[in-house]
Amino acid sequence: MLNIMEVHETNKMIEQEKLDVRTITMGISLLDCVTDDVDKLCDNIYTKITTKAHDLVKTGKDIERDFGIPIVNKRITVTPISLVAAGACTTIDDYVQVAHSLDRAAKQVGVDLIGGFSALVSKSMTPAEELLIRSLPQVLAETDIVCSSVNVGSTKTGIDMNAVNLMGHIIKDVSTATADNDSYGCVKLVVFCNAPDDNPFMAGGFHGVTEGDAVINVGVSGPGVVSKALDAARGKDFEFLCQTIKHTAFKITRVGQLVAQEASHRLNVPFGIVDLSLAPTSAAGDSVGEVLEKCGLSQVGGPGTTAALAMLNDQVKKGGIMASSYVGGLSGAFIPVSEDKNMIDAVAAGNLRIEKLEAMTCVCSVGLDMIAIPGDTSASTISGMIADEAAIGMVNQKTTAVRVIPVAGKGVGDSAEFGGLMGYAPIMPVNTSSCEEFVNRGGRIPAPIHSFKN
């Protein structure tokens, strides 16, 4: 049983070390909205969201006031729209109409973001799924808070290279469609392998079909808290270092558990999971990169970075999983470049490159995240990056993702401004060696041998 005393223990972390609950996310099933008429579908979606999430933002603010815990975002995820809209949407304009309904409903209830304009195509694409994907440049340019994800692979099915190839072109088109805003549309789009059904973080959140009618998921944060705790570990051995991280992760997760259960009770919606992920911001003192450097690195990106990140990720999971009955989502440590001040500094110093970030994704929560690249990067190069990350996820039975932003009109030496939690990013150089023949082959990369466990 959680109690207010456990929150009092964290007052110092909240006031001095940037601890926050990054998001309360309500997952909403839209399966009962399905119809073959697009206008009726949009009405059903709007009504379902505005009814279920009517009190979400108010409840989040009330919990903030009552417990003194900052809750940065209130968000919604919905059933992947490719499943909900397949019978009603026959044109790109139809999908755009649905996206506008999501945008209006989310704004009506006052949330920050809504995720689930998504397609799950890990083995192949249906015509409806391909149509949704092709609508993304217009959708992400014309809506403000709608987020999209496309799952192109899994350990059980392999990698759909047709979808990988298409997504390279789509990301380029989204970049062009939002060129007047540093290609911000790409910030709202992520390509997954092994996407989880209960992720409360954006842009990759959606409400999985195995979920109930509605659920409350919470994502915690706290790299600043871990960083501060590691000051006591200077000069100590790895046993002491690991114990410090585990103990801190436990306390952070208990705060998330309390907020999740309280929101569930007040909204009369079942509690789903707590996502343990250490989610950084571009503010000083709130950086996963800083945590890694306090483990003994002179700067993130240098030798030892991958080992330090593997240790951090594992200890966060070990500490957090003891603090909550239900842990899910991504859970670990994020390395989004634009959202992490120390990583931004390492990129600017030339110490952190995309190849090193790819190596780090083998052991962290997600993948190549919030990376700004030159606007003239080819679609096939982006597809190659997606394929590489999907392969890491497929073989290692973990979630990986790519959220890169080819910033239209900008190149290496420039920077992109995304604002808020999304931060800013120096444009990183990309290996331009051609992989066009590889990504254009078509078909599917088979699942690895260890996937056959039945």
Image (spheres, helix red, strand yellow):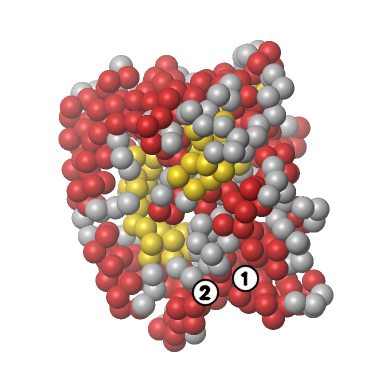
Whether 69 is drawn above or below 47: the answer is below
Location of mark 2 (residue) = 17
Residue 227: image tag: 1
Label 1 close to label 2 by CB (< 8 Å): yes
Q: Label 2 neighbourhood size at 10 Å, few (<14), some (14-19), many (20+)? A: many
User: In the rendered view, does 414 fall on the left or right side of 117?
Assistant: right
Q: Position of residue 257 (x, y in %)?
A: 46, 69
User: What residue is at 34 percent from the left and 31 percent from the top?
Assistant: 141
User: What residue is at 69 percent from the left and 19 percent from the top?
Assistant: 435
Quadrant of the drawing holding the N terminus? bottom left
Q: Position of residue 8 (x, y in %)?
A: 44, 85
User: In the rendered view, does 198 fall on the left or right side of 354?
Assistant: left
Quadrant of the drawing holding the C terminus? top right
Amino acid under disc 1: Ser
Q: Position of residue 263 (x, y in %)?
A: 33, 66
Whether 60 is drawn above or below 139: the answer is below
Q: Position of residue 430 (x, y in %)?
A: 66, 32
**Marks 1/2: CA–CA distance:** 9 Å
User: What residue is at 72 percent from the left and 49 percent from the top?
Assistant: 351
SS assignment at label 1? helix
The mark nearer the N terminus, 1 or 2, is 2
SS assignment at label 2? loop
223 or 410: nearer the eye?
410
User: What residue is at 63 percent from the left and 77 percent from the top?
Assistant: 229
The image quarter in which residue 426 lies: top right
Amino acid under disc 2: Glu
Q: Residue furthest front?
A: 413
Q: Label 1 neighbourhood size at 10 Å, few (<14), some (14-19), many (20+)? A: many
